[in-house]
Amino acid sequence: MELKNLINTLHPLERAVLPVLKDQMIFEDIVIAAKLKDIEVMRALQWLSNKKVMSIKEEVNEIVELDVNGLEYKKAGLPERRFIMVLKDKELNVDEAVKKAGLHKDELNICLGLLKRKAALEIRKDRGLMVKLTEQGKKLMDQKFLEESFIEKSFPLETKDLKAEDRFAYDELTKRKKIVRTELRKTKSIILTELGKKIVASKINVGDVIDTLTPKMIKNGSWKNKSFRRYDIEINVPSINGGRRHFVNEALEYVKKVWLELGFKEMNGQMIQTSFWNFDALFTAQDHPVRDMQDTFFIRNPGKGSLPEKKVVNEVKNTHEDGGTTGSLGWQYNWSDEEAKRNVLRTHTTVLSAKTIASLKKEDIPAKYFSIGKCFRNETLDWSHLFEFNQVEGIVVDPDANFRHLLGYLKKFYEKMGYEQVRIRPAYFPYTEPSAEVEVLDPIRKEWIELGGAGIFRPEVVKPLLGKDIPVLAWGLGFGRIVPKYYGITDIRELYKNDLKQLREIRAWMK
């Protein structure tokens, strides 16, 4: 009964292919015998293979074919054969011999070289180049060259099957122009299983069952007393990988959703920024090591950008030099607007926070903003560092905000990202005070990993940009270190290696 049910599930293409199958056949022979297209036979064989009716064995072999010159020489004879045949028992001028043999100039050079090596020619100069056959050459007139025997064979040939003399001839011919060519050819062999042999022995026919019920059949009643093809819903079919977003982009969208649900607005900005916004506005001194080439990617062309309105520039300048109106002593140096104009690939998305604070008006406060964007640092690539990475940025501008609110936002975010063990410890950053680092326990490595920095912006950052000093909670979190836990990834580089197998099989991001 199982065999009968299986036969009833066969597609018309499978029914067309099965009767021509023998114990073992190659794909090309099946195509000819079944009188179907290659793609139809291949589809039928794949379906039969899924049903365990047969197996497909694929081999890659090196094949020898005659090239254009080889096909010509197979009909007209090799140039060296035609050359010695026109000489026979007489001496000829080379030009006359070439004309009689119907050779090209490049073929003459080959003939002279080959026949000289075989001791078949005598060459002398007398009113031109004269050639005649030696005794050895005369013997060759009645003998077949190995190369001649080779090109007379039925092609294609497999190099692994060549005998010693054929291999010698093949090697010699490969040194000559377009006589033979080799290529790698895949050969598919079809091997029937015991189940397949039973089905073939059943003598099934293409018209045994109806595959499609048409309106015409319903009208004329021809469907009655007919057998319909069964559909096997349990068959093991090849998996289909539909389109989907890159898993990193899925995670990015989820992070955006988290902050939007918490009432934040999104900040956006260019990846190329002036040093003014990337460093100076954040109270990073112009001689700070972070502004060196080994840490930052500076832009060569255009090397410099423009500064914002003069009022903001002067406030930042005064704060750097002597603290301005912030009550700070500043950095006690002469601030340079040329240094501030230098273009960089932004080293953090905090540059967007600085620009946003500078744009706020009185009626905009309180305000909450976030961003997710690419940053660039001249880092050494390893399992936890990239030179191009995404950063999750956030600020809360609110006169009533405090450090406990900051801790609450951070813990809520990491809770939504699936982290249960989070700790926040004191740290130092040049533009926040107090400052903190967020760490989580890596469940795979069993060690604490730093995921980002946070704190409250110093007055030296806020007052020059906003015009007054109010609490601004701020954080910059490493996105590339946040998401690996969810995917079971231990090396941050795996996020961007674009492995197709990984992209197809990796789990979807939580909703």
Image (cartoon, grey):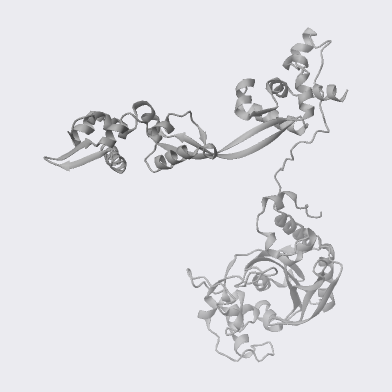
Q: Is there any visible trace of residue 483 in the rendered image?
A: no
Q: Is there any visible trace of residue 219 in the rendered image?
A: yes
In the rendered image, the quadrant that contains the C terminus is bottom right
In the rendered image, the quadrant that contains the N terminus is top right
* Name of the residue lying farthest toward the top: 220
Q: Nearer the viewer, residue 2 or 213?
A: 2
Q: Nearer the viewer, residue 144 or 439?
A: 144
Q: Compared to 41, does 301 lie above or below? A: below
Q: To which quarter of the image does residue 351 belong?
A: bottom right
Q: Nearer the viewer, residue 232 or 408?
A: 232
Residue name at image x 48 percent, y 70 percent: 300
**Residue 165 percent across, percent down from the top left:** 45, 38
Residue name at image x 23 percent, y 33 percent: 98
Numbered disc total: 0
* Name of the residue lying farthest toward the left: 127
Q: Compared to 162, does 458 lie above or below? A: below
**Residue 235 percent across, percent down from the top left:** 80, 33
Q: To which quarter of the image does residue 60 belong?
A: top right
Q: Nearer the viewer, residue 143 or 229?
A: 143
**Residue 463 percent across, percent down from the top left:** 68, 81
Q: To which quarter of the image does residue 135 belong?
A: top left
Q: Compared to 133, does 443 lie above or below? A: below
**Residue 450 percent across, percent down from the top left:** 76, 74
